[in-house]
Image (cartoon, rainbow, N blue to C red):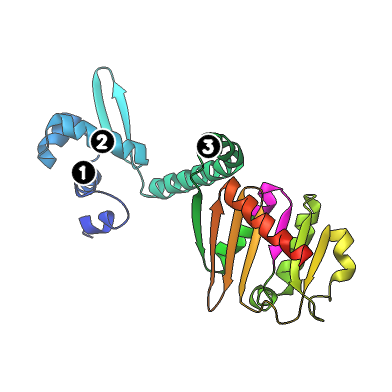
Amino acid sequence: MRMDIQTLVGIGFTQPLAKTYIVLIKSGPITPAELSTKIAESRTNTYKLLDKLVDMGVVSKSKVGKKLTYRPENPVALENSIKLKRNQILEREQQVKAAMPTLLSYFYTFSDQPGIRFFQGKDSVKELFNDTLRTGKEIHVLRSPADTPFFDQEFFDTYRKKRAAHGIKTHLYLQDNPNSRASIGMDKAFKVTRTWLPAGSYDIPVEWDVYGDKVAIISYGQEALALLIESPQIADSFRQMLKLLDTA
């Protein structure tokens, strides 16, 4: 069977790395000097290529006396290496998310430049709801009547329970209609208060959430889209605008 260099390139190898790995498979244990001749590379470049392949987990090196040799590893090692790196990336992502409130607080101490994030698709927008839980601050919501038809009642029931478990208070600004009053009996348990708007006064499929230093704009159109703005000034301005509805 012939190994095509492009097969390796397609899974993340560079051309030189792919060529080197294939030669190693054919040759078996080999010294850098011998390998440099076979792949037509300088010894310096050969060592760099070998070190990279070792880092990828598909090559190992050993030393007997003063002689250093390299041998190819089973390609399964590449899959294991990728899984390990994926887990490390996921762990780092969680660490970054946990540290973000502190980082943003420090950043906003010296700058009023807002941070902007974009979300597209249901799963992505659901991550925005998870962000409200991580932030752990009171939420002001100008609710759209399109939210429940888009995500379904089960999603919001689960979200409300998690939100209450985090001790997060929520103030809703929503239209007064039978659908909006369906869960009013659970307001105390879910730490919810409400400001009623006249029926038909806000029927656009766009929701506004303000929590902590963040403003989220969620569009429930053909596809869920959301924009998250992180700025103390902008968040405070939207909170004040929403509170004007309490006196309207």
Check whether the beta carbons of the residues at disc 2 and disc 1 lie within 8 A of each other. Answer: yes
Residue located beneath label 1 in the image: 20
| Amino acid type, label 2 | Leu
Give the vertical position of 219 relative to 73 (above or below). Answer: below
Residue located beneath label 2 in the image: 50
Q: Position of residue 199 (x, y in %)?
A: 75, 81
Check whether the beta carbons of the residues at disc 3 and disc 1 lie within 8 A of each other. Answer: no
Check whether the beta carbons of the residues at disc 2 and disc 3 lie within 8 A of each other. Answer: no
The answer to whether residue 65 is left or right of residue 34 is: right
| Amino acid type, label 3 | Phe
Residue at screen point 13% across, 41% down = 39
Q: Is residue 229 visible?
A: yes
The numbered mark, 3 or 1, whose residue comes first in the sequence reads 1
- Seen from the viewer's position, the closer of residues 73 and 149 is 149
Total tally of numbered discs in the picture: 3
Residue located beneath label 3 in the image: 107
The answer to whether residue 87 is left or right of residue 166 is: left
Residue at screen point 36% across, 46% down = 74
Distance, label 2 to label 3, CA atoms, is: 42 Å
Q: Residue lying furthest front in this view?
A: 248
The answer to whether residue 34 is left or right of residue 178 is: left
Residue at screen point 59% across, 38% down = 105
